[in-house]
Image (cartoon, rainbow, N blue to C red):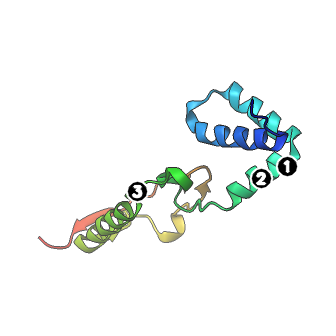
Amino acid sequence: MEMTTLSQKADFFSVDMFAAGTDTTFIVLDWAMIELITNPKALEEAQAELQSQDYELIPFGAGRRVCPAITFGIASIEIALAQLLHSFHWELPPGVTPKDLDMTEVFGITMHRKVGLEVLAKPRFS
């Protein structure tokens, strides 16, 4: 019979908790957080693991579960944006000045404007 130490159990627990991701219920995650809080060593290890990740591109995932097509996705978005900028003349609607624009941001997993921006796109080549 193999014996495991408390530290090994905490490691297994941490790996299981983070691998679970969105497939778990709130109650399970709540229990997991209580376990981390009552075990300072496991909490420190979990925090160190999270701090070492690059969350700049969170829509593509991070760590082991990162999207394998991240470079293709970013390049595709850049090309689409370049095409839009190149193919149209962009203007503000009549009666709207740059000072009238509300650039307030709403924070969350993704950032977006509190009030949508409206522009007029006129074809450059016609």
Amino acid of disc 1: Lys
Query: Hey, which quadrant is residue 90 in on the image?
Result: bottom left
Amino acid of disc 3: Pro
State the image coordinates of residue 46 (x, y, percent, origin top left): 74, 50
Determine the CA span between mark 2 and mark 3.
Answer: 27 Å
Q: Residue at x 11, y 70 (%)?
A: 126
Q: Is residue 52 left or right of residue 126?
A: right
- Earlier in the chain: of badge 1 and badge 3, it is 1
Neighbor class of circle 2 (other Cα within 10 Å; few <14, some 14-19, many 20+) is some
State the image coordinates of residue 10 (x, y, percent, origin top left): 78, 41
- The residue identified by callout 3 is 68
Q: Is residue 125 left or right of residue 83?
A: left
Query: Hey, which quadrant is residue 48 in on the image?
Result: bottom right
Label 2 residue SS: helix
Q: Which residue in the rendered view is the most extreme toward the front?
A: 1
Label 3 residue SS: loop
Q: Nearer the viewer, residue 34 or 113?
A: 34
**Do the residues under discs 1 and 2 have CB atoms within 8 angstroms?**
yes
Q: Nearer the viewer, residue 107 or 16?
A: 16
Label 1 or label 3, whichever lies nearer to me, is: 1
- Earlier in the chain: of badge 2 and badge 3, it is 2
**Do the residues under discs 1 and 3 have CB atoms within 8 angstroms?**
no
Query: Hey, which quadrant is residue 81 in on the image?
Result: bottom left
- The residue identified by callout 1 is 41
Quadrant the N terminus occupies: top right
Amino acid of disc 2: Glu
The image's mark for residue 45 is 2
**Do the residues under discs 2 and 3 have CB atoms within 8 angstroms?**
no
